[in-house]
Image: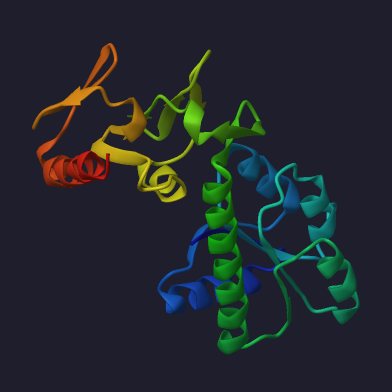
Amino acid sequence: MKCVAVDDEPLALNIIQQFAQKTGWVEVEKTFTDAISAKAYLLENQVDLLLMDIQMPDINGLQLYQSLEEKIPVIFTTAFSEYAIEGFNLSAVDYLLKPYEYERFLKACTKAKEFIVYKQNKEMNDGYLFVKYNYQWNKIFFKDIELIEALDDYIKIHVPGKPMLVHMSMKAVSEKLPAQKFIRVHRSFIVPVALITSWNKVSISLNDKSIPVSYTYQKQVQDLLNKHLESN
């Protein structure tokens, strides 16, 4: 679970990093001591969770969160208990009152993880996912995805009209896609099963496109496609 931590006290950020490392599954991708820099980063990058102090100079944590178009799951941290109600009014996952112990940190992060899994499952069941493109969040329906292609630190999602270039890894997008509808066939390609017109051991055809199947994914591809044949 990738998170960004925002706190104007470096010591508080160090504690978050230590506690996150101790969990083994919370990854602090970036830390910030001011809200403005954090917001600039969040406009360009996708993260799973915010760990954010409330009392900060210039823009406090509540104001920063209210200014975000996409409400990323957030755990507010502060030394002032009077902010708790306002934090929960913003649908915060949890609220950590400083100083807090590792066990309390772990409980909050576990709660956030459960919420994220629930949200991802809901998106899958509803048949769409959200991605950040052109500085805003866009809904993409699974039925509209024609191909997903890796391009360095970005992915290109081919949909009718203009493809979307999104700052996301293939691993991250794979986790958001239903496994029965999409399959990764190469380190650079994910294809929708419904659009496959033919295949062999080394390639897959999507109408007029030929997509290579790398050795790493050959067995996985064959097994999935054979299951689809058996079910039809």
Q: Is residue 157 left or right of residue 62?
A: left
As displayed, is residue 79 above or below residue 186?
A: below
User: Residue 68: which quarter of the image?
Assistant: top right
Q: Residue at x 89, y 73 (%)?
A: 85
Q: Give the percent coordinates (x, y) of residue 190.
A: 32, 34
Residue 230 % position (x, y): 20, 44
Q: Residue at 63% of width from left, 44% of height from top? A: 42
Q: Is residue 229 above or below residue 51?
A: above
The image quadrant that residue 205 belongs to is top left
Residue 208, percent from left and from top: 28, 11
Q: Residue at x 85, y 75 (%)?
A: 84
Q: Is residue 71 left or right of residue 221?
A: right
Residue at position x 67%, y 85% in the image: 100
Asked which colour scheme the image uses, the reply is: rainbow
Q: Tell which of 187 and 18 is nearer to you.
A: 187
Q: Can residue 61 be seen at all in this image of the molecule?
A: yes
The reply to whether residue 166 is visible in this rendering is: no
Residue 175 position in % (x across, y down): 42, 51
